[in-house]
Image (cartoon, helix red, strand yellow):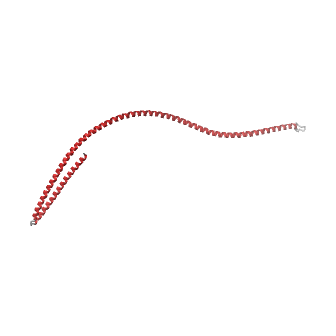
Amino acid sequence: MVSPGGLKQVDLDELAQNFTAWQKATTKVAQENSALQVQVRGLTKQLQASQDNERVRRDEISVLQGLVDKLQGTVAKRCDLEDENIHLKDKISNLLAEMDNLKQEHAKELSDASRTLQSVKEEHKEQLKQFKDNTAKLKREEGALLQQTVQQKNSELQQLQKQLEDLERDKHSQIVQLKMAYDTKLLKLQKQTAALQQQQRGPSSANHEIFRQKLQALKNQSEQEKSTLKRTIGELQQKLNSVQHSHSLKRRKL
């Protein structure tokens, strides 16, 4: 409303109504704001709880992810084990088949070996019988040959014994003859020595010198003949001993 002086007049009633309406509106807004604050606090709590739950869920998800990874690793390992198990089963099957083949081959080889062994036994038995027969025959032949050899050796021994006796007689006779010849020559030398000694009794010194020379010559000759006779007797004795030794060895062999 406008006054006559040109001033604007205020309607108190309208103003009071507007103020009352404004108060109501303000109170309503305050109430609504309070309700919204309560709602905000509730939502904030819910958000915090939700965030806490989310962190828990993330932790749980992380744990579950670890479990999943482990399970995947276990599943992969199990798959590998299953593959390896299949491979091992195939290998075992092949080995069993190979073992069956080996058993069959071994059985065949054992059967062949048994037949061969039986054949060898029979052949060995026949060879042993033949060997015994040959051995017995050879023993008989060797016995006869040995008996013949013994008889021959006995005959040779008798001949050697006779030859030894003849040789001993011959050597004894030769030794006696040599001794007799030695005695004869010694007697002759003694006679010549006596004759020279008689000649030495003469007065001539020349004859004495001649006698001394002849006596020395006779002594030298006598010594030479003694040495020759001793050497001859020694040789005869050695020959006799050699023949006796040879005869003794032959008797031992027989």
Is residue 181 depicted above or below 94 in this figure? below
**Res 159 → quadrant:** top left
Question: Residue, x 53% and y 35% (percent of image)?
Answer: 85
Residue closer to the observer: 16 or 137: 137
Quarter of the figure that contains the N terminus: top right
Question: Residue, x 15% and y 59% (percent of image)?
Answer: 222
Q: Is residue 22 left or right of residue 213?
A: right
Is residue 253 depicted above or below 117 in this figure? below
Residue 212 horizontal/vertical position (percent): 13, 63
Q: Is residue 51 left or right of residue 93?
A: right
Question: Residue, x 34% and y 35% (percent of image)?
Answer: 125
Quarter of the figure that contains the C terminus: top left
The number of callouts visible is 0
Residue closer to the observer: 110 or 216: 110
**Res 157 → quadrant:** top left
Residue 40 horizontal/vertical position (percent): 74, 39
Residue closer to the observer: 103 or 45: 103
Is residue 11 visible from the viewing direction of this image? no
Residue 218 horizontal/vertical position (percent): 13, 60
Residue closer to the observer: 114 or 219: 114
Residue 118 horizontal/vertical position (percent): 37, 34
Is residue 233 visible from the viewing direction of this image? yes
Question: Residue, x 39% and y 34% (percent of image)?
Answer: 114
Q: In this view, does 180 lie to the left or right of 28?
A: left
